[in-house]
Amino acid sequence: MSVRLTIFVASAALGMMLVGAVAVQGGGTDGSGRSPADTLETSSDDREPTPPPNEIWGLLDPGRGFLIGRTSVGELSISAYGLLRYINQMPASQVFTDHLGNEHPVKAREDFFSHRIMVWLKGWIYNPKLVYTVFFWTVNTTDQDAIFANIGYQFHRKFNLYGGISGNGGSRSLLGSHPYWLGHDRVMADEFFRPYFTQGIWVQGEILPGLWYHALAGNNNSALGIKASQLDRKHTFGGSIWWMPTTDEFGPRGGYGDYEMHEELATRFGVSGCHSPEQRYNDPPAEPANTTLKLADAVNVFSTGALAPGVTVQRVDYYILAVDAGMKYRGVFLQVEFYNRWLNGFEADGSLPVGEIVDRGFYVQGAFFPLPERLELYGATSQIFCDGDAGFGDSSEYLVGLNFYPFDTRDTRLNIQFMDVNKSPVGSTFGYYTAGQDGHTITAAYSLLF
């Protein structure tokens, strides 16, 4: 454990010391890699130097949006993302048995929702290098609403410093590719292993052409629903490094699928990691406010009786290490990501039968365009190999889907997906999965980004 902790902290510290900036590797627009700090445009109205719209490759990037106003003092634009979704998880009535032999109901759903909405106000103020984003975030299916603000200074293409809310590293999908995924949410392996979003500070940039980094120090694994008064003095450290050797880019936002129809083979290789000391946030017998860490049998690690009858885990150390590789060529996309997750350092109000739980897994996603820039077909599988020594079984999924792009842009699409889920270890009303499901899920969704 001490070796892994040293590696994670050293990686984050190294990233924090690197000289670099974010510019944009395709930040949702033309993929030119330019940032407001690199180039200035000249307004035809006043002939004063003014920067292009704020473009970054990072967390929850705004779309191109619409310019509201621009003066010599600053700029304000607005953009938004909306997702309408139907989901049907089957069978409607089912139970699953955890690794201790306890039965739990499977809470399968069938509903229509204006699922996820984000609105961004973005721009620069006082200096084109001083950028900001204020975003209004809601997930109606979980009844969660939040307002966040990110502020950053873009020193140079090789080094940007930001504060606010960001992904915890640990998974490629946490680093700005949303909403350019094949489906509208993550596949099961990614959803099970990944960290979440936290409040903190981070640096990111392009060290050499095509070689990027992101390093973060934050409060905890997930900021949603957690008050400052509940936090302890321990911190989360996460980071990622990725290399795109053949073309120095991987499409807008580094997203999934080759809508852009690359004429030259685009490749990406990455390593991501995160360490987060996690706590329950609520005292027994109340239900834990920390709901992000699930055991392989879909039970929250902080729920009373999760690892031993009548025993409640109060604290645990969470580690994740992921390695990913992807390619794009003439509409064909293929990506794989491998995960190792460690849960150890348990503190509980009674004795536990395990001192460490190690889970491994991977996903493979592939897609192609039978009709370029109009119809995309894709498939994916998740395989999760759980700690058998601790009594846990394995999980898997297989899915197929399609995306139809009615206009000449990937920013709006219709998505239809069919999934075969085998003993889901994850469950929330946010994504596609419900805890313990062993059956099928059908989804249909329409999204819009501007």
Image: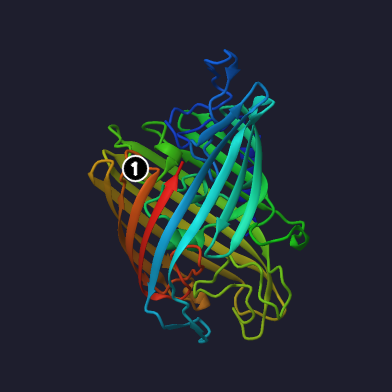
- Looking at the rendered image, the quarter that the N terminus falls into is bottom right
Whether residue 350 is visible, yes or no, is yes
**Percent x, y for residue 358?**
52, 66
Between 92 and 213, the one nearer to me in the picture: 92
Query: Looking at the image, which is closer to me, 81 or 284?
Result: 81
Q: Is residue 124 left or right of residue 193?
A: right
| Residue 41 % position (x, y) | 53, 18
- When the figure is inspected, residue 281 is found, relative to residue 84, above or below; the finding is below
Q: Residue 198 or 127: which is nearer the viewer?
A: 127
User: Is residue 99 rendered to the left or right of residue 442?
Assistant: right
- Residue in view at x 44 percent, y 73 percent: 109
Tag 1: residue type?
Answer: Met
Task: Classify 89 as above or below 164.
Answer: below
Question: Which residue has dot 1 on it?
Answer: 327
The structure residue drawn at horizontal position 37% and vertical position 79%, both measured from the top left corner, is 91
Q: How crowded is mark 1: few (under 14 residues within 10 Å), some or many (20 or more)?
A: many
Total numbered circles:
1
Q: Which residue is drawn at 49% across and 47% down?
A: 81
Q: Where's residue 88, x and y in %? A: 38, 70
Residue 186 showing in the rendered view: no
